[in-house]
Amino acid sequence: MTTDQLIQAFKAQHKLTSSFENHAPEWFIPIAELINTHQKRESKCLFVGLNGSQGSGKSTLADFIKMYLESQHQLSVAVISLDDFYLSQQTRNHLADTVHPLLKSRGVPGTHNTQLMSSTLNALKSEQPNCRLPRFNKAIDDPEPETNWPLITKKVDVVIMEGWCWGTPEQTEQELVNPINTLESEEDKNGTWRKYVNDSLKSEYLALYQQMDFWLMLKAPSFDCISNWRKEQEHKLRQAHTLLTDENVPSAIMSDKQVERFIQHFQRLTEHGLKHVPEKCNLVLQLDAQRTPISIDGSSLAEFDRVTII
């Protein structure tokens, strides 16, 4: 398959606009080629950490890199999402009852199964992984049955781990003091929730970040853009569900008003990540308000520039 054929096939599969035909060769293929170069250099399973705010297109980019590397370089690629490690409703309800009511909502550090995350990452390093990749069903707000999780039995060359706060460091105690939105000022007045989230990030997530060999970020221009992006995601989820079934749309799929409240859970760490994640990344792809790539920088920029010439 030629690269043009691959781009057209991917565009059709993901129902993308014609702009993808321009973005793929200019931005996404060079990124994939650079990851291929790093994998060949390391001669081992390469772990790629992909950070991007909600609705930034990180899942689409991860899927494209997988398709490209498998088609053009015959590499075996596994894509896993932070979202697929959310705790069950039952477990989050327990946290809501015992720690803080806001932990009922999935999303922030402390609402993921980090033990499962660690065991999955470790299994994927093996020559014979024999592990399943978790899957979370957002339409029902619960994990899929394990029998529905993809089974990996052959050696993996590249693992792409993507997530909205993946790679985001913890905040200082001083940074936690003042609420930053209505949700925090009205529903977390004494800071119990944000402290629990921050402590979870520090104690459970930072060690997992260390397993990544290469960091990539899709950087939104600001948090203000993310509300509209997140609403678009929910609209697509609603549409996909109604096309697949004749049932009523599940209540777990949110309205625009619900999205506006929901994203306030993410504002603190999203804004913190926009400030501090770029400094640790090999590549940072800057996006505009329409999610169009406009520039790229990072420690691997020179290598990226060489790749674009090839």
Image (spheres, rainbow, N blue to C red):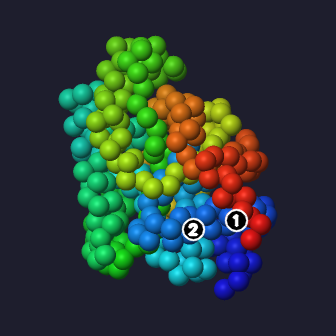
**Residue drawn at 52 percent across, 21 percent down:** 181
Q: Residue 95: which quarter of the image? A: top left
State yes or no: discs 1 and 2 in contact (Cβ < 8 Å). yes
Front residue of 302/23: it is 302
Residue 72 placed where, x, y %?
61, 80
**Element marked by disc 2:** helix
Residue 148 placed where, x, y %?
33, 70
Task: Give the vertical position of 1 relative to 186 (above or below).
Answer: below
For residue 21, say whether it is visible: yes
- Quadrant housing the N terminus: bottom right
Residue 9 placed where, x, y %?
67, 77
Tell me the amino acid under the disc marked 2: Thr
Dot 1 corresponds to which residue?
Answer: 307
Please tell me which of labels 1 and 2 falls first in the chain. 2
Q: Is residue 87 left or right of residue 137?
A: left
**Residue drawn at 44 percent across, 60 percent down:** 47
Dot 2 corresponds to which residue?
Answer: 37
**Element marked by disc 1:** helix
**Residue drawn at 73 percent across, 51 percent down:** 293
Front residue of 122/143: it is 122
Task: Give the vertical position of 17 relative to 285 (above or below).
Answer: below
Tell me the amino acid under the disc marked 1: Val
Q: Residues within 10 Å of mark 1 (few under 14, many from 20)?
A: some
Front residue of 278/2: it is 278
Q: Is residue 105 left or right of residue 91?
A: right
State the separation of the CA atoms marked 1 and 2. Answer: 9 Å
Q: Residue 189: which quarter of the image? A: top left
Q: Residues within 10 Å of mark 2 (few under 14, many from 20)?
A: some
